[in-house]
Amino acid sequence: MTQSTNVETLDTTIQKTNEWLSTLAELLESDESTAYEALRATISTVRDSLHRDEAAHLAAELPMLIRGLYFTGWTPAQDPIRLDKEEFLEEVRRRGGLGFESPDPAAAVLAVFHLLHEQLSEGEMDDVLGQLSGDVRDLISPALL
């Protein structure tokens, strides 16, 4: 059980973050620690694939704690990176340390996008998808059904 901070905003974001991680762990059939790494690796790779304005719009829909995770290591002055499917998966694997004992990067990406699809507005998801390469969109399309 999570201990209360006695600050409603913090308690709410801790609860929401725990819900996201629990859902993601169920999707990955793993623990919350693995879910955290999958989430961190995937959303940071997505963030770096988006134009600055869109990266900020996506962040606005994330729970506060996850938003902090999302912005960690971001360089806003950097141009978006355009990755094909294999490059995207390799970047997620590299950022998350996902390998033999963890879910494969494709499973992580699918699970995270399934969660994002459930939690974000339809318009925001459309905007994010519109900035990813076609084969990355093809990769994640099963998560959006």
Image (spheres, helix red, strand yellow):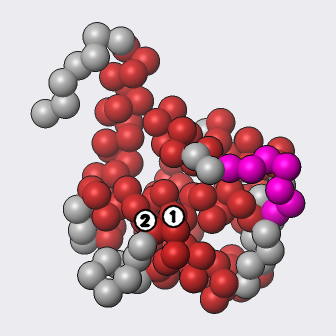
| Residue on which the image places disc 1 | 41
Task: Give the percent coordinates (x, y) of residue 24.
Answer: 35, 59
Please identify the quarter of the rendering in which residue 49 is found. bottom right
Task: Give the percent coordinates (x, y) of residue 72.
Answer: 58, 46
Q: Residue at x 80, y 74 (%)?
A: 82
Please identify the quarter of the rendering in which residue 2 is found. top left
Task: Give the percent coordinates (x, y) of residue 60.
Answer: 65, 36
Residue 76 shown in magenta: yes
For residue 131, side relative to residue 108 (left or right): right
Q: Residues within 10 Å of mark 1 (few under 14, many from 20)?
A: many
| 109, 143: nearer the viewer | 109
- Disc number for residue 125: none
| 106, 87: nearer the viewer | 87
Picture quarter with the N terminus: top left
Please, what is the three-letter code of the amino acid marked with disc 1?
Ala
For residue 105, side relative to residue 135 (left or right): left
Residue 116 shown in magenta: no
Label 1 near label 2: C-beta < 8 Å?
A: yes
- Residue interval drawn in magenta: 74-80
Q: Residue at x 79, y 47 (%)?
A: 76
Above or below, comparing residue 135 to residue 74 in the picture: below
In space, the residues marked 2 and 1 are separated at their CA atoms by 5 Å
Q: Residues within 10 Å of mark 2 (few under 14, many from 20)?
A: many
Q: How many marks?
A: 2
Please identify the quarter of the rendering in which residue 111 is found. bottom left
Task: Give the percent coordinates (x, y) of residue 129.
Answer: 72, 65
Q: Residue at x 64, y 78 (%)?
A: 88
Q: Secondary structure at mark 1?
A: helix
| Residue on which the image places disc 2 | 38
For residue 48, side relative to residue 113 (left or right): right
Q: Is residue 29 visible?
A: yes
